[in-house]
Image (cartoon, rainbow, N blue to C red):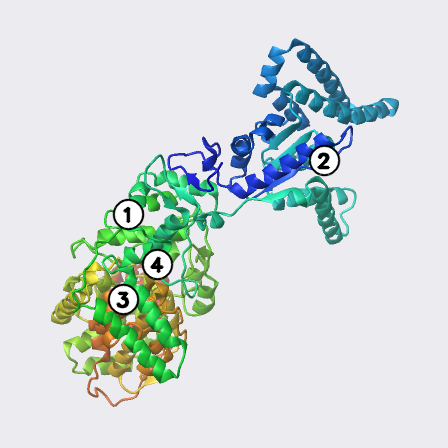
Amino acid sequence: MASSQIIFPLRQPDSTSQPDAANLLARPVFEELLKLIQERRDELASSKHGMRLRHGAVLIDGARGTGKTSVLDNLELYLGSVDKELVNSVHVLKPIDPTLLEDHDDLFLNIVVAAILSDKAVKSALEKDSEARTAMYKELHQLGHALEHMQTQREKKGLDKVRAFIGNQDLIGHIHKFFERVLKLLDKKLLVMPIDDVDTSLHRAFENLEVVRRYLTSPLVLPVISGDAKLYHDVTWRDFHGRLLKDSKSHRMEAEKLARELAREYHRKVLPPQFRLEMPTMRSYLANHAITLGEDAGPTLTFPQFHAWLEALLNDRTNGVENSYLPVPIRTVRAFGQLVYRLRGLIPDLGQAIEAGKLTKESIRHYLLMPDLPIEAIERFRSDYQTATSTGPEESRRNSREVAYEEFARNYGANHAYKKIASPLEGVSVPTWIETLQQHFKYDHTAGAAYLVLKAQSDWTAGRNEVSEQWTSMFDTPLFQPQRQNVDYPDFRATGDLDDWRTKLKDRVPESWLSHLPGASILSYPVPEIGPMVSQSLINAYNSMHLEPDQLLLAELLLHRNFYNQSKTGVLLCVGRIFELVMTSLLRDMTANDIATILHRAPFYSFSSIAQTKTLESGEPEDEEQEETYFDHSELADAQALLADAINTWRRDVKAGDLRLSPWLVYNVMNKFFNQAWIFNDPKGATVPDPFLHMRQVAKKAFNSLWAAFGSFEKGPLYGLPPIIATVNIGDGEDFTRSDIYRQNITPFAGGNSREFGLRVGAITAMLETHPIKGMAYTVYGRSSAAVLTLEASAKPTAKRQTRSEWLYEKTGKKQFEAAARVMLTLSEQQAESILAEYLARFKDPKLGAAYRRLKGQ
């Protein structure tokens, strides 16, 4: 096999048996096996082996799905492609499967003998040579007799048992002679015996290893065993542990330690370390440029190129810092082969595009996200930027960095008529790839995160074209609904710990809700926002203020009304609507109706939205008191329309319509944003001098936090920038432009030539610099109130105060006034009057008393 290139076929649902040696992946393992087989054959040729036994089994070590079976299945194919002389002197059996051992069988050796006799070459030779056939069956008869003695020795006693033990010793000799007879029949020197997954049948794994130790020690045979060394060790030490504790259960810890040590030494003997070959990992294959995907004479792409494409589809522009890298869920060769077969109709077009565009692993992601910008533009910018940041004083480095941005603007800016290129990936259907990957990963329990991201991408692609009346929320997709993931997707592996939710929400939300919280989610999520409770005095002051419509709109985006705590109707201050509005504006054009919809529901990722609580229960009397915190949002219709127009104008200016918004990027920004919201919008509350100015300040902090979060996940090598970010909290926001978080995370894409660079490369951080919400939050308004008012700490936000109907039902078992009054007529007059007095004092309502006295007088 002259070429070192490996070709992985596309249309091959079963990857174990290959038609050509060029398709074999585990090349290093095959090469080592070749050396071991050559050495063993040469040893036999140079010495009289006689009855000299040896433990020389080769272990192909690897976890499930790593391609061990493929090595055994294709061993003869590989040997024939590299050393035909060796193939003429050794015989490679078909892999022996220990799981074929029936429950009533008690010896794996039976299957070994049967596998040899059923081998095609052996059967053919026996048919051609009657003399050899007679000798073989004679030896087989003696071997069978020895096997029978060995299998019945437990039932014998006295001298019969001694004879059985002697027969057991003879068995080893007969096995050796049997192998010798087979090799003579085939005119070969060495019998290579692949044994597939001795550890697969767990309840017999140790017994099968014992057969290898006792009976497959002939120098004429080379057992090649596939399996997981860690699993072998686990099975063996547990067997030893059980034997040690059989007669006494004391000293269990000491027994376990001893059993583990015995297992290590046992494996050192049966499976010598010098003969253990480790299977390559899938990660090593994906980094190997010598392995290509393709078929026949069509286009091919290397494993690193294919992996880079899948990484780009999942991670988009996310830079991977702060645990923001989403790995492609391909852990094994088996999983990879199944994925390739699923994508077999899409890979050729991708390969052709990559081949025609001469794309590298690095440039694939570039042209997916910046299709009309030559990658040379980023490479030149990276070189200029690195030169500017390497040496010299700070001011000099800063000036040099500005030169890098100026050079980029001069050569590739909006005002430069450089020759735009056609995207090399123009013919590749990204939505089809997203949809196909989503369908595939839905059935892989380790691919939960990838599936949620791909599903969100599909949902968003469909949602961009929905009319406003049909639009609900961009977050109406499982990636942003952690509390439902264990219900909707129970088969996916849950890796997100929700213990922090229980810690932070304890004593703030009903214990009954916490008790039903899932143990884990597919991904990690921040604790939902509680927000501070706004005092009634502050609400009264706010209601009396004469604010402009856009000021009112900004305030109402923050206020969560119709929210109950234990004792009263409350209003919370939450930033979730700011987050949702900005994110939605990145995804699609907006209408006034979209903004009104966001205003009318609970703030995104607030506890109310996560818990899906209701403000009023159905079936209450019509004469229930109206909530004092009601606000007629119809007054904001003009402001909503103006904001929608401003957003759509902004979208055209920054070309947001060309943006493929990444769910994975939004997920990471969401995590950072809502973790920081617990700091800049502390639910413990604060004393503030002015109600509206405080709300504007919270909105400003919220936007700054969101802006900086995008910068922290976008800045990186994709744009020719170093992945150095600031991770400090947002602070009070007053000196935001002087903060590390602004200078490190935002300025690479904002201000002057930096912003022109950011817009040219499609960075969201650059787009947000002129977002209308930023303008609303940053505008300084005049004083609105001199009173010092208080934001109260949130109590249990979802514990609804008791309504009239609930109180009546508790006292009388009825919710309506007349029905309750009839029940009261059955009570003593003292009890009835007590109920009436308590009701009047609690609700300041005479209707119950009137109903009672009317019925009493009838």
Precedes in sequence: disc 3 or disc 4 = 4
Q: Amino acid at mark 4?
A: Trp
Q: Earlier in the sequence, mark 4 or mark 2?
A: 2
**Secondary element type, mark 3:** helix
Real-space Cα separation, disc 2 to disc 3, in angstroms: 64 Å
Where residue 356 is drawn, which disc sits there? 1
Asked whether the residues under the numbered discs 2 and 1 touch, taking CB atoms below 8 Å apart as contact, a structural biologist would say no
Q: Please tell me whether residue 49 is drawn above or below residue 442 in the rendered image.
A: above
- Cβ–Cβ below 8 Å for labels 4 and 2? no
Q: Seen from this angle, which residue lies furthest left?
A: 638
Which is closer to the viewer, label 3 or label 1? 1
- The amino acid type, in three-letter code, at marker 3 is Ile
**Which label's residue is closer to the chain start, 3 or 1?**
1
- Disc nearer the start of the sequence (2/1): 2
Residue at figure coordinates x 71%, y 31% from the top left? 44
- Can you tell which mark lies on residue 664? 4
Q: Could you say which disc has been placed on residue 213 in the image?
A: 2
* Label 3 packing within 10 angstroms: few (<14), some (14-19), many (20+): many
Question: Residue beneath label 3, please?
Answer: 764
Cα distance between the residues tagged 3 and 4: 14 Å
Q: Is residue 719 left or right of residue 100?
A: left
Inter-mark Cα distance, 2 to 1: 56 Å
What's under tag 1, amino acid-wise? Ala
Q: Amino acid at mark 2?
A: Arg
Task: Name the residue rendered at 76%, 30% in the picture.
Answer: 49
Question: Where is 14 relative to 674, above or below?
Answer: above
Dividing the picture into quadrants, the one containing residue 121 is top right
